[in-house]
Image: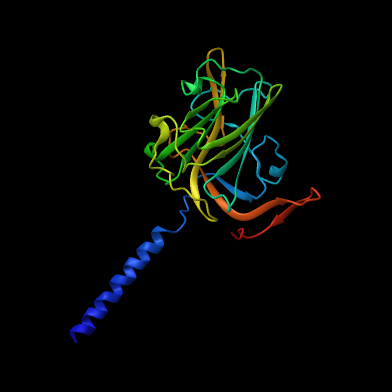
Amino acid sequence: MKKFMKFKIAVPIVTVVALLFYTTNLPVDAKRDKEYIAKQITNLKVDGKLGEWERAEIVAFDELKDVGGGIPKASDFTGQGRVAWNAQDPTRIYFAVEITDDELQDIHPDDSKWWEDDSVEFMFDFDNGMVRESLVQWTLGANGKDLSAAASKANTEWVLVKTGNDYIYEVAIDPTKPRGNPQFANPGKGDKFKAKAGLTIGLSFHANDCENGKREHQIGWIPGGAWDGLAYGDLTFDAEILTVEPAGKLALMWGALKK
């Protein structure tokens, strides 16, 4: 009888533990106001040529962030971005950002007051904590050289192509690799990141538009403060695969890649 009672008690305990493990390991469905669904692109090369990005969703940088009295004229600044991933390389998040800016400001050294130089910022809430302490920032300068905040040569592969007033940033960020500025590195956040279909994290990516020795606008995909954990969008990784056929025609495939 005692053995039977012990068995009856043990079964619910094991069940509860199993349920807790299962629920805490489910992908987080954060449900912020905006969502970017990142598709897989299997043939990505960080070379500044965006042909393989053709089918990826484009979002406009048309929302004010920390600075600006209004959206600038298109002749002054415009921007847009795309995001992708690849199940064969799941620790990397890929970005294609296109900026048109009539004046380049580059007056500060690497990793110093980067927000007052023309640059693009990529900010993540890997844990969906939605508080400042959860956030990690990567910043890449419009001079094609400066890596600031958490960005480092170890964790960021990027190319910037400048043609007149047009800038193309193609970027691969790996948050599991060693980070840059300790003040912004936040090493406990995202250091074990691994994308998978259905996973959702927080994302804000935006540009600093600087002229006359100061930042005149900060413009991105999501309105609100760059360091406001509630002013982010959902970045959801999707199993759908966008590929380019050898003939150059774009094809759409479904399902995750087999490793």
Q: Residue furthest bottom?
A: 1
> Which residue occupies 68% across, 43% down?
53
Residue 227 horizontal/vertical position (percent):
43, 33
The answer to whether 34 appears left or right of 187 in the picture is right
Report the residue that reaches farthest toward the top: 212
- Viewer-proximal residue among 227 and 194: 194
Which of the pair 243/19 is nearer the observer? 243
Toward the front, the furthest residue is 154
Horizontally, is 12 left or right of 99 in the view?
Answer: left
Q: Position of residue 15 (x, y in %)?
A: 33, 71
- Picture quadrant of residue 208: top right
* 94 w.r.t. 240: above or below: above
| Colour option used | rainbow
Residue at 65% in and 21% down: 76
Decide which of 87, 23 is in the foreground and name it.
Answer: 87
Q: Position of residue 150 (x, y in %)?
A: 46, 33
Count the labels in the image.
0
- For image coordinates 45% across by 31% down, the residue present is 180
In the picture, the quarter occupied by the N terminus is: bottom left
Q: Position of residue 46 (x, y in %)?
A: 64, 38
Q: Is residue 214 found left or right of 183 in the rendered image?
A: right
1 relative to 259, above or below: below
Seen in the picture, residue 22 relative to 216 is either above or below; the reply is: below
Q: Quadrant of the C terminus?
A: bottom right
**Residue with the most extreme left position:** 2
In-front residue for pair 16/259: 259
